[in-house]
């Protein structure tokens, strides 16, 4: 700061002297004084440099995330009408099958096989809903006793497997059991293609889980000779009786509803009852 004052005093004295010497010498002295002041300054004079501005970047517009749609759960479809392909054989007779070998006594079944002395049924395709295998050797009869042992092997446990019986011109009956200890009894109406449920119960008669259940159905003469009574047993316990149904020739067999389950059948018995 002191140096600046000295420079200004010297410049003032020179200016006064130059005034007396003429205008040219005065201009040169002023220019020299300005250069001297600029050289003595510790900080360069700022220049008007424009401050750069931030260029905004384009922010991507968010896209809509699709909302997942509900997947429909398959509903039970009425089983298709069964087409008989069997030729009746003479009776009366008895037919026993322990499934140690192929007896030739059963109808066609795409997902059935003999295995370890049992008749294995399932699993079926997910698009299918009801399956039956007729005992073609048993033929059609008015009165009979049928029995079989059935064991759950694998698959879904909320479905049923068992037998069909009294399959005639008007109706067909299905008795099924489940690993949860339930049994169901339904009647199929051939004319109108629908199931009529006659019973759906949890019962101590049913051995749940992987236990073996003994199913027995007796179709016997009623008091009136034109009618029959149906007695239904599970493990020798009478669970249902259907009284006074018209007598007719009917078929029997093994059955399973829905898909994704496997069951084993053994010790089949069929005995014709003489009125």
Image (cartoon, helix red, strand yellow):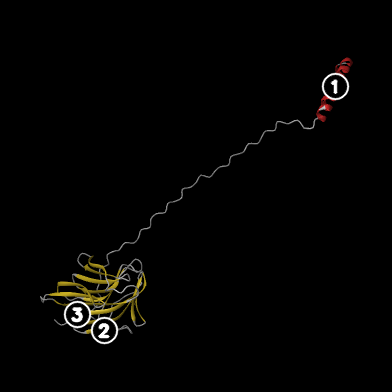
Secondary structure category for the residue under label 1: helix
- Identify which residue is drawn at 87% across, 19% down: 13
Furthest-front residue in this view:
204
Q: Which mark is residue 105?
A: none
Secondary structure category for the residue under label 3: strand
Disc nearer the start of the sequence (3/2): 2
Instruction: Give how far across and how far down residue 194 sits, in percent.
Output: 23, 65
Give the distance between the C-alpha atoms of the residues marked 1 and 3, in whole angstroms.
143 Å
Marks 3 and 2 close (CB-CB < 8 Å)? no
Residue toward you, 31 or 240: 240
**Numbered disc in front, either 2 or 1:** 1
Instruction: Give how far across and how far down residue 113 sits, in percent.
Output: 35, 78
Give the distance between the C-alpha atoms of the residues marked 2 and 1, in whole angstroms.
139 Å
Query: What residue would you read off at disc 2?
Result: 96
Camera sees residue 121? no
**Numbered disc in front, either 1 or 3:** 1
Graded by Cα atoms within 10 Å as few (under 14), some (14 to 19) or many (20 or more), the crowding at tag 2 reads some
Give the distance between the C-alpha atoms of the residues marked 3 and 2, in whole angstroms.
13 Å
Marks 2 and 1 close (CB-CB < 8 Å)? no
Q: Quadrant of residue 226?
A: bottom left
Instruction: Give how far across and how far down residue 43 sits, in percent.
Output: 77, 32
Q: Is residue 60 above or below residue 273?
A: above
Query: What residue would you read off at disc 1?
Result: 9
Query: What residue would you read off at disc 3?
Result: 144
Instruction: Give how far across and how far down residue 129 sits, in percent.
Output: 31, 67
Marks 1 and 3 close (CB-CB < 8 Å)? no
Camera sees residue 241? yes
Secondary structure category for the residue under label 2: strand
Graded by Cα atoms within 10 Å as few (under 14), some (14 to 19) or many (20 or more), the crowding at tag 1 reads few
Q: Quadrant of the C terminus?
A: bottom left
């Amino acid at each position: 700061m002191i140096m600046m004052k000295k420079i200004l005093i010297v410049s003032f004295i020179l200016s006064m002297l130059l005034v007396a010497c003429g205008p040219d010498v005065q201009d040169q002295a002023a220019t020299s004084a300005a250069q001297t002041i600029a050289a003595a300054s510790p900080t360069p004079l700022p220049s008007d440099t424009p401050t750069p501005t931030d260029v905004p970047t384009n922010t991507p517009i968010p896209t809509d995330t699709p909302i997942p749609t509900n997947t429909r759960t398959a509903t039970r479809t009425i089983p298709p009408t069964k087409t008989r392909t069997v030729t009746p054989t003479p009776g009366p007779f008895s037919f026993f099958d322990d499934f140690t070998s192929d007896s030739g006594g059963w109808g066609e079944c795409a997902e059935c096989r003999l295995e370890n002395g049992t008749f294995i049924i399932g699993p079926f395709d997910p698009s299918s809903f009801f399956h039956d295998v007729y005992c073609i050797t048993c033929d059609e009869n008015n009165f009979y006793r049928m029995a079989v042992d059935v064991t759950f092997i694998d698959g879904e446990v909320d479905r049923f497997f068992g037998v069909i019986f009294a399959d005639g011109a008007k109706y067909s009956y299905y008795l099924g059991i489940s690993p949860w200890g339930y049994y169901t009894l339904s009647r199929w109406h051939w004319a109108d293609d629908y199931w009529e449920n006659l019973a759906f119960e949890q019962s101590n008669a049913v051995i749940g889980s992987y236990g073996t259940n003994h199913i027995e159905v007796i179709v016997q003469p009623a008091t009136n000779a034109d009618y029959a009574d149906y007695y239904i047993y599970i493990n020798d316990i009478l669970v249902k009786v259907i009284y006074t149904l018209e007598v007719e020739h009917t078929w029997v067999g093994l059955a399973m509803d829905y898909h994704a389950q496997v069951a084993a059948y053994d010790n089949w018995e069929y005995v014709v009852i003489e009125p």
